[in-house]
């Protein structure tokens, strides 16, 4: 608990920022979407496949983010939000809103926290640049980011695995 | 402007008057201008991009590439430092990074303009003209690097000359080699 409090104190603002970007993506997905008709086409997948796929996204968020100063995580989290917004729009138009509660909601928050954790690690370089230009770089910045980055990565790893288990065994879509 | 036009005078100023931050900000300005030309190159290369808004494409490329360029240059300066650190054990990485960034940014700006010109005027004369201009720009940016290495960081003249000559030869190889590849 102490660890989570410390992490939130240090990086809480980035979590809030990425959550807002995600929400912005959801809103734009609901209101601004292509006119062509899409339908739900659920595909069955093994929890290991889901986990590996999400882990790839997580690694893209971390390494892409570190190399782009946090721009790639903003784009990926925003586009994830957009896709979810689009799914919500389809569910609303097809009157299948219950599918969202049974197929998306059980694992969504765990997966979202995991992906946002990866995005936070990826935006460390951007955070450093931002602080550097404001002349507010903490003295132990590199030591702090290294330890916090590893901790956040392991938390994200565990949450992604949990989310893939929930997605495989609990979340379900019956059309 | 003093940084580019009169580097020896610029780096000989009072140490508190020139900060890494101000030099990096100047470089970011140049990078943003360079990114406009990169956007133009992209418009020439990928016809599908023509349908999109020029300003949005420019903003997207700038947002994605400027931080990448800054971080890439940091790693590049670390590679150079693997050797140079032996000649000045107490040097500050941030100062060296600032100089390498200044050197590369100037080259980057004129390379992007050169490639644009090549797209607009596809003839041998333009190609030769661009190679000559690129070499001149390279020498100009090396002059900035040389002045910075001596006055800003504190390397000896000998080490600075060897380092600048190595960089010049490397760039010459890339420029001439790239030209042959093009042909």
Image (spheres, coloured by chain):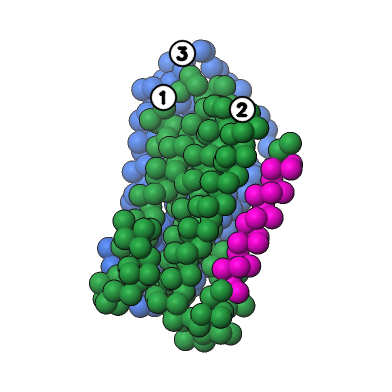
Chain colours: A blue, B green
Instruction: Please state if B112 lies on the left or on the right of B166 as rendered.
Output: left
* Place of residue A139 in the rendered image (x, y in percent of width and height, measured from the top left): 35, 78
* Distance CA(mark 2)–CA(mark 3): 42 Å
SS assignment for the magenta stretch, majority: helix
Residue hosting label 1: B53
- The chain holding disc 1 is B
Vertical comparison of A24 with A33: above or below: below
Quadrant of the rendering where the C terminus of chain B is positioned: top right
Residue hosting label 3: A35
Q: Are the residues at dot 2 and dot 3 in contact (C-beta closer than 8 Å)?
A: no
Quadrant of the rendering where the N terminus of chain B is positioned: bottom left
- Residue at the spot 63% in from the left edge and 67% down from the top edge: B166
Range drawn in magenta: B162-181
* Place of residue A151 in the rendered image (x, y in percent of width and height, measured from the top left): 50, 68
How packed mark 3 is, by other alpha carbons closer than 10 Å (few <14, some 14-19, many 20 or more), is: few
Asked if residue B178 is among those painted magenta in the image, a careful observer would answer yes
Q: Are the residues at dot 1 and dot 3 in contact (C-beta closer than 8 Å)?
A: no
- Residue at the spot 65% in from the left edge and 62% down from the top edge: B169
Q: Nearer the viewer, mark 1 or mark 3?
A: 1
Q: Residue A157 — which label?
A: none
- Residue at the spot 35% in from the left edge and 49% down from the top edge: B29
Q: Nearer the viewer, mark 1 or mark 2?
A: 2
Instruction: Please state if B12 lies on the left or on the right of B43 as rendered.
Output: left
How packed mark 2 is, by other alpha carbons closer than 10 Å (few <14, some 14-19, many 20 or more), is: few
Residue hosting label 2: B122
**Residue A159 seen in the figure:** no
Vertical comparison of B60 with A58: above or below: above
* Distance CA(mark 1)–CA(mark 3): 21 Å
- The chain holding disc 3 is A
* Place of residue B120 in the rendered image (x, y in percent of width and height, measured from the top left): 54, 27
Q: Secondary structure at mark 1?
A: loop
State which quadrant residue B127 falls in. Answer: top right
């Amino acid at each position: 608990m102490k660890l989570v409090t410390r992490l939130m104190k240090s990086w809480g603002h980035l979590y809030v920022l990425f959550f807002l970007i995600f929400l912005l993506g959801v809103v734009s997905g609901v209101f601004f979407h292509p006119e062509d008709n899409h339908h739900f086409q659920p595909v069955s997948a093994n929890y290991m496949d889901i986990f590996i796929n999400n882990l790839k996204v997580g690694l893209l968020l971390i390494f892409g983010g570190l190399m782009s100063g946090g721009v790639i995580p903003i784009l990926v989290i925003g586009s994830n939000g957009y896709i979810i917004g689009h799914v919500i729009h389809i569910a609303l138009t097809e009157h299948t809103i219950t599918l969202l509660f049974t197929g998306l909601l059980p694992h969504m928050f765990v997966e979202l926290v995991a992906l946002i954790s990866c995005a936070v690690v990826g935006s460390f370089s951007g955070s450093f640049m931002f602080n550097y230009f404001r002349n507010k770089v903490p003295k132990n910045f590199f030591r702090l980011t290294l330890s916090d980055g590893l901790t956040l990565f392991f938390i994200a790893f565990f949450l992604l695995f949990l989310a893939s288990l929930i997605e495989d065994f609990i979340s379900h879509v019956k059309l | 402007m003093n940084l580019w036009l009169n580097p020896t005078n610029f780096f000989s100023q009072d140490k508190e008057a020139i900060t890494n931050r101000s030099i990096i900000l100047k470089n970011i300005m140049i990078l943003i201008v360079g990114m406009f030309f990169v956007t133009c190159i992209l418009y020439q290369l990928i016809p599908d991009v023509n349908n999109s808004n020029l300003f949005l494409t420019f903003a997207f490329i700038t947002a994605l590439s400027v931080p990448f360029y800054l971080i890439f240059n940091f790693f590049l300066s670390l590679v150079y430092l693997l050797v140079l650190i032996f000649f000045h054990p107490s040097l500050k990485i941030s100062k060296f990074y600032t100089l390498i960034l200044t050197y590369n940014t100037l080259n980057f700006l004129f390379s992007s303009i050169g490639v644009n010109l090549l797209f607009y005027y596809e003839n041998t004369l333009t190609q030769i003209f661009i190679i000559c201009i690129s070499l001149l720009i390279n020498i100009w940016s090396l002059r900035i690097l040389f002045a910075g290495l001596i006055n800003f960081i504190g390397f000896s003249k000998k080490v600075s000359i060897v380092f600048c000559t190595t960089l010049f030869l490397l760039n010459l190889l890339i420029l001439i080699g790239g030209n042959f590849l093009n042909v």
